[in-house]
Structure formats: structure tokens, C-alpha cells
Image (spheres, rainbow, N blue to C red):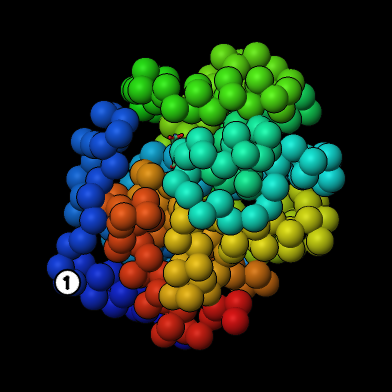
Amino acid sequence: MDLKALLDSIARDVLAAPARGKVADYIPALAKVDAQKFGMAFAPVDGPLVGTGDFQVPFSAQSVMKTFALALVLAKDEDSLWSRVGREPSGTAFNSLVHLEYERGIPRNPFINAGALVVIDRLIGLYGDALDAVRTLVRTESGNPDIDVDMEVARSEAEYGHRNAALAHFMSSFGNLEHPVARVLDPYFRMCALRLSCADLAMAGLFLARGGLRADGSRLLSTSGAKRMNAVLLTCGTYDAAGDFAYRVGLPGKSGVGGGILTILPGRGCLCVWGPALDKSGNSARGVDGLDEFTTRTGWSIF
Ligand code: GLU
């Protein structure tokens, strides 16, 4: 299969369709991004990366980074996190407070904001510097040492982060954070503000397609750890639209409000897309269209 020709053809079709969605504007620094950008990159487990469009243009990773934070926690401790965070779809928005009171400060899953804050809290306990642990992992796996925090976005996140602060304080009141709220929020905001391209992300996520093996052949996750992460990505990785995403795309994936989506084709490769305009669930509208086309034309979904 000529993957480069396939990606080019998908990009043409996606860009020819009427534009849908809206760029995230709840953090002012994100609202400036050009909605017409579109890129897609596929990193096979056994060959060179191919890409189309803006696949080498860095963008704000946002919640896509939650994938790497969770992997680093599970790499050192496969079990204890799950008494503090569930692994069920939330059925509510990524930043919702409603379940937390009923469920006594235990977030539904590690990919909604509340769950990711608990993951960061655990990451601090395991690694000390949580931001550096995530940044080093994505730099090493992607081979791009220049990946770094966009400080304008990080500051904007902190300035407008009242809801994340509320989630953290709420969980703290139930004893579900080991570190002070400010100590957890700071690396969370910075991690979300990491900038990297589809090409970087496709390379960085490959360990999940290799059953937990890193680029240098060492093991980050056990085979079952990688299976479990992919299962949580499938059921919880695309906000409150994980069912629709599984129906259309059929791959484990994690989206972010920067418009990026990381997807895993176990045993085959890692596919990333970026289109800043988001649908009503917060997933990249053109990104989901592109991924849908890819798995439909190749037949490479997990189903
Ligand atoms: N930094 C964003 C927030 O916490 C992440 C949102 C996202 O990409 O889902 O609001």
C-alpha cells in the first residue's frame, strides 16, 4: 500500500469538505490558531514515518499528553492508581465536576481532567518532577530534543484554570491528592502546553503499538500494561464521544483541545492527526474525519 499517496488523498478530501467546528477559545492563547491547518502522520512499527499537510507543524498537545503521564505511572506501578481513579467512560464533559461529589472524589477515568490531576499527583510521588518525566519521554521517543512548553499557553491555562483548580481542591478535600493543589496544577498546565507535531506524536506513541517497548527496545510497559492502556484509550480517550469515535474510527485514541488526536494500531503503528477546529464534544472535527477515512480505506481498525 502506498501510504503517502493514501494520506495525501485523505487530506485532499478532508480539506475539500465544508469546514466544521470551532477552535477552542476557553484558553485565550489557543484561540489564535489557524483553523485551516491540517496534518496527518503515520509511524509504522517497522518502517519510516509518512505524513501529509502540516504534519511537521508543532501545535499545543493539551490532553493528548495525559496518555504519556498515565504510561509513566503504570510503568512503575501498575495497580495502586486504580484505587484512586476509575476506568469507566465519564458520560460528562472533560472538565465536569458533577460526578466527583457523588463518587467521593474518585474521578471516573484518568483522561478527564480530574483523573489526569490524580495521575500527575502520583507522577510527582514516583518521579519528583512530573513535567520533566513527561517531556523527557516524548523527546526521547520522538527523537526531537526541541519539544518544550509553550509558556504563553501555560500561563493562559493557569490564569483561566479556575475549574481545574476547583477539581483539584475538591479531590483534596476527599484526601485523593497527596501533594498540595498548586504543586499538582503547575506541572499539569505545563504538560498540557507542550508543543509538538503530528510526526513527533506518532513516533512518541509507538511504544503502545509495540506492546510497551520503547524505541531503544527497552520496556516501558508490560504487554498487559500496554493492552490495558489501549483499552482505556478506546473507552475513555475521546471525551464524551468515545462510543462514536470507536464506531467511526475503531482505534484506541486520545484527543486534545489543541486539535490533535493520537491513535494506536496495535502491532502496526501509530497514527496522528491535527486539525484545530473542534466538534461539539471537543474532538478535532477534521481529525476524526481523516482517521475515519484512514481506517475505512485500509481496513486497519482493531475490529
Ligand atoms: N489543559 C486543558 C484543560 O485542562 C486540557 C483540555 C483538553 O485538551 O482536554 O482544560
Q: Report the residue at 17% width, 62% height from top.
A: 19
- Under circle 1, the secondary element is helix
Q: Report the residue at 63% width, 46% height from top.
A: 108
Q: Is residue 151 visible?
A: no
Residue 259's spot in the image, x, y percent?
35, 50
Q: Report the residue at 31% width, 55% height from top.
A: 280
46 or 117, nearer to the observer: 117
Q: Report the residue at 30% width, 34% height from top.
A: 26
- Is ligand 1 within 8 Å of the beta carbon of the residue shown at mark 1? no
Residue 187's spot in the image, x, y percent?
56, 24
Type of amino acid under label 1: Ala
Residue 123's spot in the image, x, y percent?
71, 30
| Residue denoted by label 1 | 16
Residue 269, located in which quarter of the rendered image? Answer: bottom right
Badge count = 1
**Residue occupying the far front of the picture:** 102
Left or right: residue 82 versus residue 169 is: right
Residue 154, located in which quarter of the rendered image? Answer: top left
Residue 88's spot in the image, x, y percent?
64, 55
The quadrant of the rendering that contains the C terminus is: bottom right
